[in-house]
Image (cartoon, rainbow, N blue to C red):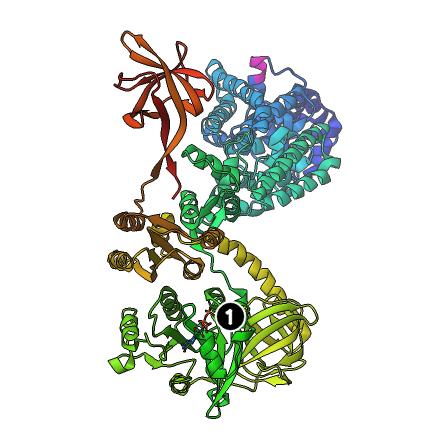
Amino acid sequence: MAKMRVHELAKELDIKSADIVKALGEKGIDVKAMSSVDDSEVKYIKDKFSKSKTSEDKTAEKVTPTEKTEVKEEKKHKRIITSRGMVRLKGDGEERPRRPRPDGEKKRRPRPEGENQNAATQKTEKTETVKKENEQIAKPVEQEKNESANKPVENNVQPKEEKVESVVTPVAKNEPKRPAPTAESAARKAAEIAAKAAAIAESRGQSRNNDRRNNRNGQNRNNRDGQNRNGNGNGQNRNNRDGQNRNNRDGQNRNFGNRDGQNRNNDGKSFNRDNRNGNNRNFNNRNNDGYNKDKDFDRNDNNRRNDRRRDDQKQSAPADIIQSKDRNKRENKLRQDKQERGRKNYEDGNGGRKGKNGRRVDLSKPVLQKPQKKEEKKEEIKVISIPEALTIGELAEKMKMQPSTIIKKLFLEGKMVTVNTEIDFAGAEEIALEYEIMCEKEVKVDMIEELLKEEEENEADMTSRPPVVCVMGHVDHGKTSLLDAIRETNVISGEAGGITQHIGASVVKINDRKITFLDTPGHEAFTAMRMRGAQSTDIAILVVAADDGVMPQTVEAINHAKAAGIEIIVAINKIDKPGANIERVKQELAEYELLAADWGGNTEMVPVSAHTREGIEELLEMVLLQADVLELKANPDRMARGIVIEAKLDKGKGPVSTVLVQKGTLHIGDHIAAGANYGKVRAMTDDRGNRITEAGPSTPVEILGLSGVPNAGEVFVAKETANEAKAFAETFIADSKEKLLEGTKYRISLDDINSQIKAGNLKELNIIIKADVQGSVEAVKQSMLKLSNEEVEVKVIHGGVGAINESDVILASASNAIIIGFNVKPDAQAEEIATREKVDLRLYSVIYNAIEDIERAMKGMLEPIYEEKVIGHAEIRQIFKASGVGNIAGSYVLDGSFKRGCSARITRDGEQIFDGPLASLKRFKDDVKEVKAGYECGLVFEKFNDIAEGDAVEAYMMVEVPR
Ligand SMILES: Nc1nc2c(ncn2[C@@H]2O[C@H](COP(=O)(O)OP(=O)(O)OP(=O)(O)O)[C@@H](O)[C@H]2O)c(=O)[nH]1
């Protein structure tokens, strides 16, 4: 090419000459407008300025609408080149050879159309489109998160998911329509990849590629300009990348984006419930990559921190981001609130089941486990302790139930009871078992026994004491006379009617040894003296008149002595009398298991005479001998303790008590308590009326000072202080009341023998037999003894001839025995006591019936007793004949009443002509239930028509009588 001048070249290139001069000057070639330049310089200039112009053209295209396909496609190609040119231009301005880019390279960098324009100009429509596209493409990511989070967010996102499809799909569809010029390959490829990425994101529910593309689309550039970053991060996508992109302005966004996506997945695995909001996920991802998986409540901290971070960014964030953040913040707040509620539920053990999100069930897992932690209820068998008898109310209280519950239950079983109905242990146990409650017998602590309980005394402190002897025997056999003879005093003359009225006590000296005698006025006192288990006597002298022999009271005395377990020495009295027969007495006594020693037995029998005093000394020697055998000892050096023998209220002295000191020594001034009474010993008198200051063991004394009159048989104790004595008495009163109530409740009766046996309460059945003849007593006695079985032993504790008397009843009461009488009746006093003491007293005229009753009672098969009861009398005054019925006796009821279903006896001239049931009872023509005295009625007798006017009719019924 020929040399051209600079101005010509400028003209050709449509540029200023100065520009060429400057350009060549920069290259070190000094030229002017009129200077000539060679071909190489022309080429350089042309290359240089033609590119500049192309760049300018491209700049002009910026405002060109992209909708025009042809222009767009042409310019697309240029854009790619220009872009690179621009890079070079921004460099050092060095001329570099143009490098035509192969398609493959272009493919490696696919870009959606219009992105370069976005990079160049931010506020064009294209930018908005891309922004929208980014936003929409990012939505699925958020949606994915939200799907695994809570529903409210998911709902918010739902509409946007549709938009994503609408954006992505046209890209894929438009592709084949477009021409495929080489220059457009990069753009097409970019569109393809974008479409594929969107499809993958949609199909997998992941948006990693989208994120990456988004990052590529704008974030690399955005990183450079700092603002576009926010534009990319529209909506919830922004939440994910917000912090990361900002933090990674150096172009590592993509990498973090990937990590972000992974973390989301991690979150999605097990953290959905914890990370219901995207922010939370973001934060977790950023910090922990799912580390918080196991730390439920850290998520809240994360949320908070996340929020704070976003708050910090508000100043630089565009309005839409701020709005979006605000929304997210609100969402976060809501979610946090929910989490708080969930946690509360969790802590309260309510679980989170009520939440809409099914994942909340996870929160409830520990709650579900809670019942497992609960201790299994151990089946405890409730055991209550109940007394021998109690009321329904008391039982209900023990069972901790309402009495009405038990009453209702029993009512349904056909038992009518009230709250005050008394039931025995067996009955109560039966009821309690229905409610799976076991019963055990209340072990009642006998407070008095406890009070009286004493420790074993030291043998070394014990010294020999005088024996205490009582004299027993049949009436007029000479008890008092004998005692008088022994005491060498005559007390008989001082007694009213010559009969001993009260217990007296005296001490006699024989060979410098003392013997204390008690005179027993009757069995009542004797029994009473045994009631505390305190044996008042050591030896009993049984007086049997040699001329009279063994008499009923002799037998009673024997039985009492045996029951008390005291030794018996027999004094066969009145041997001075002509009819005395010592051997016969011995023989009779042998029948009662008292065999004389000289007959080879163990019982000493001494023939005496109160009148002649013959044998008295031998008797006393025998008493002392027996005392030696018994080794009677006591400790005199201790607080006194003994038994009340007799007590009375003296008008002048106040309460006067005769007490027998059994242990220790009683002094004047001692504080004592006897039963319900207490006081201080003010005065003491011995058996001879002498004032004494102290009384040792086995000494009977009369004392003054007790607050009241104690019962005979009560134990008295000396106490250190007045308060102790008072406390003893008060305890006694409280205990006695209970015992009094209980004592009246229970007495063995034929009806409850079986239940008592079953309950294990009855091991021995004590029976007292009274009959008109001794033969009957013995016959029944032997039959009764044969009824003994493995469970219970029948014991006849007393049998005698004669009416049932007071002594029998008292013995029965003391021994919990049943009295059986054969052809005998109780006397008035015995009946009264039996009623009071609730002693079961049975009367029979046939011995067999008695045996049968006892047998049945023991087997629990006692049948009810029916007794005939006459209810009225009538007189037949007229006979009516009725067909089909027979004769009707028109009668007039004289007394009582006639009742339907009763029986009748017809007597004519004193002779009974009929005894049978009444078939019909009528008043005029009507059947009636009852016709009372003074009224007329019609009587029809069962299968009996032989009636006549003037016949007498007696109506009767069989009624059950209590046993
Ligand atoms: N011949 C004779 N008569 C005696 C003897 N002992 C008592 N008697 C008489 O028998 C009668 C009754 O004597 P008591 O001593 O009263 O008999 P008891 O057993 O005390 O009588 P009660 O106090 O009623 O139980 C009196 O008339 C006595 O005189 C005796 O050894 N020989």
Residue 60 in view of the camera: yes
The magenta stretch spans which residues? 68-72
- Let me know if residue 80 is in the magenta part: no
Looking at the picture, does residue 607 appear above or below residue 450? Answer: below
User: Residue at 71% across / 31% down in the picture?
Assistant: 322
User: What type is the residue that disc 1 sits on?
Assistant: Gly
Image location (x, y in percent) of residue 410: 44, 37
Q: Which residue is mark 1?
A: 498
- Asked which quadrant contains residue 356, the reply is top right
User: Residue at 36% across / 49% down in the picture?
Assistant: 842
What secondary structure characterizes most of the magenta part?
A: helix
Instruction: Tell which of 168 and 270 is nearer to you.
Output: 270
Question: Which corner quadrant of the figure contains ligand 1?
Answer: bottom left
- Is 19 positioned to the left or the right of 791 in the image? right
Looking at the picture, does residue 756 appear above or below residue 83? Answer: below
Instruction: Tell which of 903 and 745 is nearer to you.
Output: 903
